[in-house]
Image (spheres, rainbow, N blue to C red):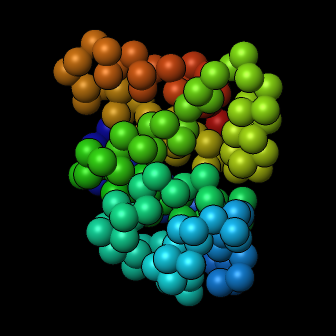
Amino acid sequence: MSDDALRRRIEHAFSGVPRPEKERIAYARGAWETPELVRDFGGRHWKDVPIEKVRDHAAHLPLFSPEALAYYLPAYLNAALVDLDVRDFLLSALTISNEAQPDLRAFFLRRFDRLSPLQKDAIRMFLIRMRDAEASPIAKRHWSQALETYWDVPAE
């Protein structure tokens, strides 16, 4: 699948997600990064968030509220197609890092189980695209791990 086809698939899958109110952007209101996260994303359509802002907040995806995560995730997916820093952080966010830790798994599931089958399929296709584009066997394995731990179930 080409990057353009993947972008269209992502846009279609997330097109019906409502934009969260500014006060509903952050999950962790007390985190020191929250004011900047709200400033840089709040009130913007996900397509209008500059890639530089996505990069600035590449590690802050877990700070989004569940509704903001569903809304702004397409900005991260699209940025990761061209930005290696965003790609690395996004891979981490889309992987259940330690299945043996029930709290980590539960946090991951609370955030991503609410996505629709169409949205999950778009993420699965993104992960497959990233895996298949990698030359390094180690990097391929990391992308495969994300698929295997959660995403490798096609949409119904």
Residue 116 in the figure: left or right of residue 152: right
Q: Is residue 114 above or below residue 74?
A: above
Query: Dividing the image into 4 quarters, which one contains the N terminus?
Result: top left
151 versus 29 height, above or below: above
Q: Position of residue 143 (x, y in %)?
A: 42, 26
* Residue 134 at x, y percent in the picture: 25, 26
In terms of depth relative to the viewer, which is nearer, 34 or 132? 34
Q: Which image quadrant: the C terminus?
A: top right
Task: Residue 132: give x, y in percent of width and height.
Answer: 31, 25
* Residue at image location 63% in from the left, 22% down from the top: 98
Can residue 156 be seen in the rendering of this structure? Answer: no
Task: Identify the residue at horizontal 40%, vertical 79% (top origin).
Answer: 48
Q: Please determine whether, in this image, residue 98 is positioned above or below residue 116.
A: above
Q: Which residue lies most toward the left here? A: 135
Badge count: 0
Left or right of 128? Residue 155 is right
Look at the image and tell me whether residue 150 can be seen.
yes
Seen at 37% across and 70% down, the residue is 53
Give the quadrant of residue 95.
top right
* In the rendered image, the vertical position of residue 129 relative to residue 81, given as above or below: above
Location of residue 75 (image quadrant): bottom left
Image location (x, y in percent) of residue 47: 42, 73
Q: Nearer the viewer, residue 7 or 134?
A: 134
Quarter occupied by residue 35: bottom right
Q: Identify which residue is drawn at 52% across, 57% down.
A: 60
